[in-house]
Amino acid sequence: MSGVTNLARNLTDTTRTQAGRVAVRVDNAAMTYRALDEASARVAGLLHERGLKPGDRVGIMMPNVAEVPVVYYGVLRAGGVVVPMNPLLKAREVAYYLGDSGAGLIFAWHAFADQARAGAEQAGAESIVVDGVSFPDLLASADPDDKVADRDDEDTAVILYTSGTTGHPKGAELTHGNLLSNTEVARADIVRAGPDDVIFGGLPLFHVFGQTVALNVAVASGACLTLLPRFDPEHALRIIAGHRVTVFEGVPTMYVALLH
């Protein structure tokens, strides 16, 4: 039997009890849970204005910046499906991901917007450029939709693409039930995170490790996620010390770089 659910409820639940706490940091900039919740509701409102229906796919092509959780949870709360994409993809690859997943819209970070826009045009999709000026204005013009769409445990929440080493990348469909249980196991048994924790966010959020064990665990536990857009060992050590990181998540190449 499947229940009515939505991964984005983790955000709205946490905001009720931790509204004033910092949810996301990027260097000196900080965003509280209240601000993250409101911005994601505006993304949901924007998507509804553009005709998004439950189950529609939306691409996200951004490095680790604060706008990723804003758009990620905004798409989910609107009932859409997130298609996370490496920001270094070329136009041809962008077109493939969008066409294969059936995404009609992509949110792209301004530094990578040319490839994203060209790929979206090839796939017949719309693109929204995310930057520090026009994007906040766009969100401010949208009516926030505070509701969280009812989804089923078995409904797809995220489509993650394989690396495509043996052929074309394939879209792996992760359901709301999958991601909620993964997040809960990681939160309770592996990370054991709580509201006082600061989780290092240097793993790319377009991969399942960073997305589940950093982003979704932080939001489910009311912890702070401190993001590093591009991994650099000196910058990482400054963040660990300056932001008083309590949970470091990495892959072997990161540990080697830090040791050096």
Image (cartoon, helix red, strand yellow):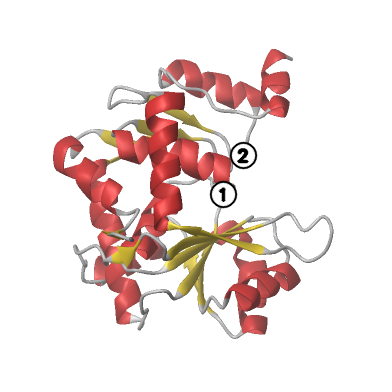
Label 1–label 2 contact, CB within 8 A = yes
User: Does residue 255 appear to the left or right of 158 in the view shown?
Assistant: right
User: Mark 1 highlights which residue?
Assistant: 63
Q: Residue at x 73, y 20 (%)?
A: 256
**Taking 6 as reference, is 256 above or below it?**
above
Task: Residue lying at the far right in this picture: please name it.
Answer: 166
**Taking 231 as reference, is 197 above or below it?**
above
Say which amino acid is labelled 2: Arg
Q: Is residue 48 visible?
A: yes
Instruction: List x then y, in percent, for residue 231.
Output: 63, 34
Q: Residue at x 25, y 42 (%)?
A: 33
Q: Classify the position of the C terminus by image quarter.
A: top right
Instruction: List x then y, in percent, for residue 183.
Output: 41, 40
Say which amino acid is labelled 1: Pro
Q: Determine crowd level at label 1: few under 14, some 14-19, many 20+ residues with C-alpha closer than 10 A.
A: many
Q: Determine crowd level at label 2: few under 14, some 14-19, many 20+ residues with C-alpha closer than 10 A.
A: some
SS under mark 1: loop
Q: Which mark is residue 230?
A: 2
Q: Classify the position of the N terminus by image quarter.
A: bottom left
Instruction: List x then y, in percent, for residue 235.
Output: 58, 26
SS under mark 2: loop
Task: Residue lying at the far front in this picture: please name it.
Answer: 1
